Amino acid sequence: MRKFGLIGYPLSHSFSQGFFTEKFKVENILDVDYANYPIPNIHDFSTLWKDQNLEGLNITIPYKKEVIPFLQHPSLVVKTIHACNCIRRYDNELYGYNTDVIGFQKSLMPYLKSQHTNALILGTGGAAAAVEWVMQQLNIHYKFVSRNTLYSNKEANQSNVIGYDQLTDSIIEQHTLIINTSPVGMYPNVNETPAIPFEAISSQHHLFDLIYNPSETLFLSKGKAKGATIQNGLEMLHIQAAESWKIWNTETPIIQ
């Protein structure tokens, strides 16, 4: 049996297992299994591959950066943004990819308007790195917003990191695209939201929350109340999962 799965810790928020189980059923894909591997420590990563039937993994919080030293063949995006969320084993070597980049860009594009030339990226983790890459490809100016600006500068390799306490109405007004890459507001903590001045949000804004559970976070709800367009991360997840399946099923790995 061909085996695939997801690593992270914890995995109570996991989308992937349900997605692939349903995909295999609907498309009558036989002799394939997708399982969750909630490993509490990255040192457990190598032991997973002792199962010779394991062909590929998706990676989620907190291991998108930590898996990179285990890769023999990281893609250009992985090497650039230092985040990997998809691995394929081929000839007992590991090939690393980032499908978050593709999922985010494809899901965002239909919402972009002419006024969306400046963005705020809330958070500085692996998902934020994928968002940063897309902002660069689309020539959208951006700033990171973090609770810890010293840590953020190191992780993001950027000088344009500000703290939440530095956000003003003027900054919000200027940055009409706001992307939450942090877990703030994720189930079960649905009453939490990033600490931004929502009173400065307007109909010119678009708010993108990479969280998909709940489908409308408090961050999105507050933005919608001010007239902003909103979207959650579910479509992004569907796209990146489909891209993972393509990667796992090409005849030979493609690294760009």
Image (cartoon, rainbow, N blue to C red):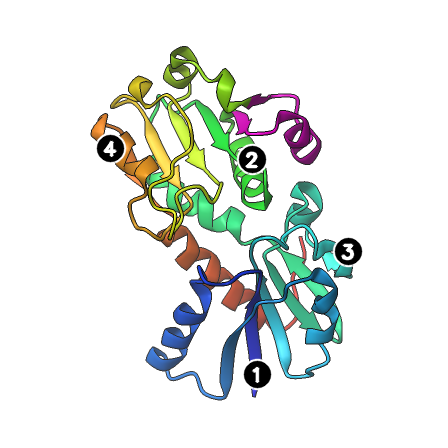
1 vs 4, front mark: 4
* Residue 82 screen position, x and y as percent: 68, 45
Q: Residue at x 64, y 48 (%)?
A: 83
Disc 1 element: strand
Q: Residue 37 magenta-drawn?
A: no
* Front in this rendered view, residue 215 or 187: 187
Is 110 situated above or below 215? above
- Of the image marks 2 and 4, the number of the one nearer the N terminus: 2
* Residue 152 screen position, x and y as percent: 64, 31
- Of the image marks 2 and 1, the number of the one nearer the N terminus: 1
C-alpha gap between disc 2 and disc 4:
24 Å
Is 98 situated above or below 254? above
Residue labelled with disc 1:
2
Residue labelled with disc 3:
69
Three-letter code for the amino acid on which mark 1 is drawn = Arg
Three-letter code for the amino acid on which mark 4 is drawn = Lys
Q: Is residue 139 left or right of residue 187?
A: right
Q: Is residue 198 left or right of residue 135?
A: left
C-alpha gap between disc 2 and disc 3:
22 Å
Disc 3 element: helix
- Of the image marks 1 and 4, the number of the one nearer the N terminus: 1
